[in-house]
Amino acid sequence: FLRDVLHQAGVATKWIVSPDQQPFLYAEAGSIDPVAPRLVLLHHVDVVPAGPDWSHPPFGSEIEDGSLFCRGTIDDKSLGIAHLVAFLRFRQLSSPDYSLVFLAVGGEETGGLQGTGWLVENHPELFENVQAVLTEGGTNRLYGDRLGWWAIEVAQKRPLWLEATAFGRPGHG
């Protein structure tokens, strides 16, 4: 789907296939200077593996009380579309002095080593001159149809050693 949208807009894309056959999508727009700084819009296209005790069938899709229940309905899919729109809008800028990369990967829900980690190790050229990577994180708050804020997280999945006691049913995170 993402590739089709980019192609319809005239954007050249590249498939990069991981050793476990996950297809990753890469596109770049902006400066033609090979040493220009680059910003990566990174999102993951995989979803949490199905497990026991789901309140709804994980491979189905059901609407209940105005909410859609199925794997991947929340986790990073809307951000991927926001990145796609930002990438397409960026292409309309005149003579940018930097490049924008759109990168859709898998492997995040299983730790990232077979996704972005594999890309960094095996395709370091994709990350040359990268100044920053924007990916999932933070929280976004809607008030009705109005966006209250769009939070940007500056780090994720870093160690923060705590001792805590928790009660109740655990969740993803």
Image (tube, grey):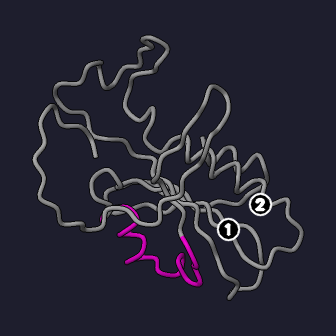
Q: Residue at x 31, y 57 (%)?
A: 20
Q: Where does the N terminus fall, quadrant-wise?
A: top right
Check if residue 131 falls in the magenta segment.
yes
Closer to the N terminus: mark 2 or mark 1?
2
Where are the magenta residues, as a range?
113-132
Residue 100's disc is 1
Location of residue 123 in the rendering, given as x and y in whole percent from the top left corner: 46, 76
Q: Residue at x 56, y 73 (%)?
A: 132
Tally of numbered tags:
2
Query: Which sits in the foreground, 69 or 3?
Result: 69
* Figure quadrant of residue 50: top left
Q: Label 2 neighbourhood size at 10 Å, few (<14), some (14-19), many (20+)?
A: some
Location of residue 15 in the rendering, given as x and y in whole percent from the top left corner: 54, 59
Q: Are marks 2 and 1 in contact (CB under 8 Å)?
A: yes
The answer to whether 28 appears left or right of 133 in the picture is right
Location of residue 73 in the rendering, given as x and y in whole percent from the top left corner: 45, 32
Residue 90's disc is 2
Query: Which sits in the foreground, 168 or 55?
Result: 168
The answer to whether 59 appears left or right of 133 in the picture is left
